[in-house]
Image: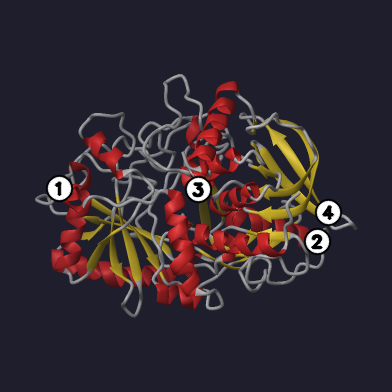
Amino acid sequence: MSELSRRRFLGMSALSSAAALGLTTVSTRPAAAADHSPAVIIGTGYGAAVTALRLGAAGVPTVMLEMGKLWNDPAEDGTTFSDMLSPDRRSTWFKDRTEAPLASFLWLDVANHDIDPYAGVLDRVSFGDMSVYVGRGVGGGSLVNGAMAVIPKRSYFEEILPRVDADEMYGQYFPLANSMLGTNHVDPEWFETSRAYRFARVSRKAAHRAGFRTTFVPSVYDFDYMRREEAELVPRSALASEVVYGNNHGKRSLDKSYLAAAVGTGNVTIRTLSEVRDITRQQDGTYVLEVRRIDELGNVLGVHQMSAKHLFLGAGSLGSTELLVRARDTGKLPELGEAVGRGWGTNGNVMLGRANHAWDPVGPLESGMPALGIDAWDRPDPVFAEIAPVPAGLETWASLYLAITRNPERGTFRYDPGADRAVLQWDVDQGQPSIDAAKRVFDRINSVEGTSYRYDLFGDTRAFETRFTYHPLGGLVLGEATDLYGRVAGYDNLYVTDGSLIPGSTGVNPFVTITALAERNIARILAEDVRRT
């Protein structure tokens, strides 16, 4: 057994044991209730997980603080996560009704359900004209995304992060990230016959007839498991309408890869249901965090302080940005600059649907994990459109797409003292460039096919939805709010290690880019800043 495999085994055992015992602390060693650690990481998403593994492997005692719960404990029905068709309280973060991305079908509100408030796995954070979907739990967004592990076009990466060495990223860190994440590819021969991907083949035919290319996309969902799902040899997950509220099987989420290996080093402890509210800095350079502990029903169990010499922000574009905007504007970290809170974008997300002809059925069985995209990124208004499923369990004659566009519009976060939160300044009109770009592609497809848009999916009569994003990026942009390795300007030993470093866009699903960038950054920080303790 390799050292990495051994660590993963030990870490997964610790995660399973903690879940079985109902513990909120995960460690391979007896967990001490220490209020200080040489390194503290806020969050457990992609960048945070990379950082934890590399710190732990270097022998640095590290504590990870996660506001969500550990998702490794089956409920009474034997499953950990609920599906999209019959979601229960596990689906949503402290709401009394689910908030699915498709608000309606034939203008009927059939997608959402009343639930009891609970520390569920998916949150929709609203800022007026923009809502942001984020994962809540150990593993962050890896628990709730569609698993599409796509690398940006190199030319676009060089445009958005021109001072990052692309040779190093594409030669070393992207391959490392994909290897660690467990990225795999669909078997094209199986894809052509799979009932679960008939919906993708229908969209591919329409795209090709209109002159657009399509491409297979890698995934961190195990395609071999999915083949066995279709053959009814194993319990279904991707083929059982499981995606945005978590997957019970098949997905290689971070708790099965980076985080398991991190805990398995023996130097990393994860504390769940722990929300960091404030950051201050003492005269000796130590960072002090105010941490609020809750239970799964939202009851506040207490507030305590945690301190660290090295503090890493990995709470995602919203979480990390809010912490630093609040710290700056309340005077707790007054040396933070004006770049903090700027450069936020939606990755150009726009969702739309098309109505297919009666002779082009998509079938009642649709995989929740996309495997194909329309690649129109070489056009004047670039578009990469995921061919997304509508896993309704019945024939819909609908094709759904999440288009990623090159939208230059950016938002800014400002602190609202009355609400004690960072508020996003974003106007609905800022989504129009995304609509315009997507419309040029799909108007062409509809014209060639003689089809039309679906106007019944988003709760009103709009054909294009830009009022939410799955891919929040920016707020603490690399080289502006930080140096070129995520060190926060004005403060030693304070780092950003998540998607807030990326200036609003990657042109594809961003999690592999976040992972690879975190690998690059922590390698430099370990070499230059952090000493084995």
Disc 1 residue type (three-letter): Pro
Closer to the chain start, of discs 3 and 2, is 3
Q: From the image, tell me which residue sits under label 2.
A: 333
Query: SS at mark 2?
Result: loop
> What is the distance, in whole Å, between disc 2 and disc 4 at their CAs?
12 Å
Q: Can residue 15 be seen in this view?
A: yes
Q: Residues within 10 Å of mark 2 (few under 14, many from 20)?
A: some
Rounded to the nearest angstrom, the CA distance separating label 3 from label 4 is 29 Å
- Under mark 2, the amino acid is Leu
C-alpha span from label 1 to label 4? 61 Å
Q: What percent of the width, then of the height, locates residue 493?
A: 75, 60
Mark 1 or mark 4: which comes first in sequence? 4
| Residue 87 screen position, x and y as percent | 42, 32
Q: Quadrant of residue 283?
A: bottom right
Residue shown at 30% from the left, 38% from the top: 225
Local secondary structure at mark 4: loop
Q: Residues within 10 Å of mark 1 (few under 14, many from 20)?
A: some
Q: Which residue shows up at 62% across the image and 59% down it?
A: 522
Closer to the observer: label 3 or label 1?
3
SS for callout 1: loop
The residue tagged 3 is 141
Q: Distance between the residues labelled 3 and 1?
A: 32 Å
Give the distance between the C-alpha atoms of the residues marked 2 and 1, in whole angstroms.
57 Å
Between marks 2 and 4 in the image, the one whose residue lies nearer the viewer:
4
- Circle number at residue 361: 1
Q: Are marks 2 and 4 in contact (CB under 8 Å)?
A: no
Residue furthest front as drawn: 1
The reply to whether residue 408 is in sight is: no
> Which residue sits at x=42%, y=59%?
509
Q: How crowded is mark 3: few (under 14 residues within 10 Å), some or many (20 or more)?
A: many
The spot of residue 37 in percent (x, y) is 76, 45
